[in-house]
Image: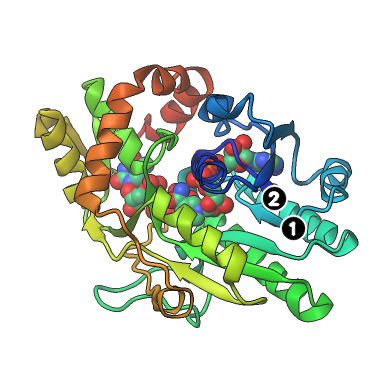
Amino acid sequence: MNILVTGGCGFIGSNFIIYMLGKYPDVNIVNLDLLTYAGNLENLKSLESSPRYRFARGDITDRDIVSVLASEKPQAIVNFAAESHVDRSIIDPSAFIKTNIMGVQVLLDACREFNIPRFVQISTDEVYGSLGPVGSFSESNPLEPNSPYSASKASADLLAHAYFKTYGLDVVITRCSNNYGPYQFPEKLIPLMITNALEDKVLPVYGDGLNVRDWIHVLDHCKAVDIVMRKGLPGQVYNIGGRCEYYNIDIVRLIINKLGKSESLIKFVKDRPGHDRRYCMNADKLSSSLGWEPEISFPEGIDQTIQWYLDNQKWWEGIKTGEYLKYYDTWYGDR
Ligand code: NAD
Ligand code: TDX
């Protein structure tokens, strides 16, 4: 099976490529990635000499490069490429609109032109908006995104659905909750807190710290994407979640305790505008129809993840320079 993966040098995409090539000897992957600030060739260094892997640097909004790769007629395109950080979308939504919406249109058009039999759009729980203290999101919930990031992802979902309805394109959409694990860029909560704590830096917790996220290990997400890519029904949406809710503050305290640091590093800072209070996924459809279940418990996964950041200090120290520091200062400077 030949797969075109987009955004494969980011956190989830690189874990997906490593998982797929390790699991299936008959899978070949081409990875199209622009190498934005979030893309890192280091993540896939172990595959550089693999005859089943090829990297192409390029933009999913660039019709020429997308056409060249789609004309090779992969059996599926799996789209991880996106601007993915809510806080950056608040600073400037432009790149989010371009990549997350227009890029998806270019990929969908290429699927039509070259008769690609399957397009997998990697979406997010954030398209549903925010939950109160009880309940969970199911696939039939309305889309009520609250950030420029989630609005751009919801737009892409609607576009993908429209191409299914209008042109009969074989599209499946996955909506997953918050991922954690190796290779996550240290702008997101868990790697930010681990690496800041290791550097004895302030741990900035937004608002009262009582926002809730539903955590899933990235490997469980990758396994779900594989199953949906192979067996999902055309036009369907599949929620993916870890059945694992935590208050942000509890995650931060857990990391501090595991690293033997002091809680005095915690600083409650000005809240994120439009901050969604709670996410919780109902993934029963995926479980009952395609037999997927998350396998990595949070206590096991978080230990393994903290260990990964301890073992790969060079990886994240290389990132926390230049552009990263500029962004950090812009976002956290006045908080
Ligand atoms: P990431 O920011 O770590 O990686 C994004 C990758 O896309 C990078 O390699 C970047 O270089 C590439 N990219 C960005 N713009 C591009 C463009 N125009 N053309 C080609 N490549 C481009 O993101 P991630 O956390 O790995 O998320 C991957 C996908 O999963 C995203 O679509 C995101 O919305 C979705 N998602 C993420 C989470 C999460 O918790 N991280 C949860 C649910 C869904
Ligand atoms: O410094 C911080 N302090 C803080 O309190 C950061 C970076 C985050 N937070 C809070 C905000 C959220 O309530 O932690 C929670 C998690 O924040 P993020 O890691 O930024 O994730 P979130 O906004 O929930 O979005 C993530 O999950 C869905 C991913 O970044 C998205 O790409 C994905 O679609």
Which residue in the structure is indicated by mark 2? 3
Question: In the visual, does 264 lie left or right of 11?
Answer: left
In the rendering, which numbered label is found on residue 332?
none
260 vs 152: above or below: above
User: Measuring 51% from the left and 29% from the top, which residue is drawn there?
Assistant: 43
Please name the amino acid that badge 2 sits on. Ile
Badge 2 element:
strand
The answer to whether residue 110 shows anywhere in this view is yes
The disc labelled 1 sits on which kind of residue?
A: Gln
**Residue occupied by mark 1:** 75
Q: Image quadrant of residue 102?
A: bottom right
In 3D space, how far apart are the residues under numbered discs 2 and 1 (Cα atoms)?
6 Å
The one nearer the camera, 299 or 278, is: 299
Question: Which SS class for mark 1?
Answer: loop
Q: Quick check: can you spot residue 146?
A: no
Q: Position of residue 101 (x, y in %)?
A: 69, 57
| Residue 232 relative to residue 263: left or right | right
Q: Quadrant where the C terminus lies? A: top left
* Quadrant of residue 320 within the rendered picture: top left
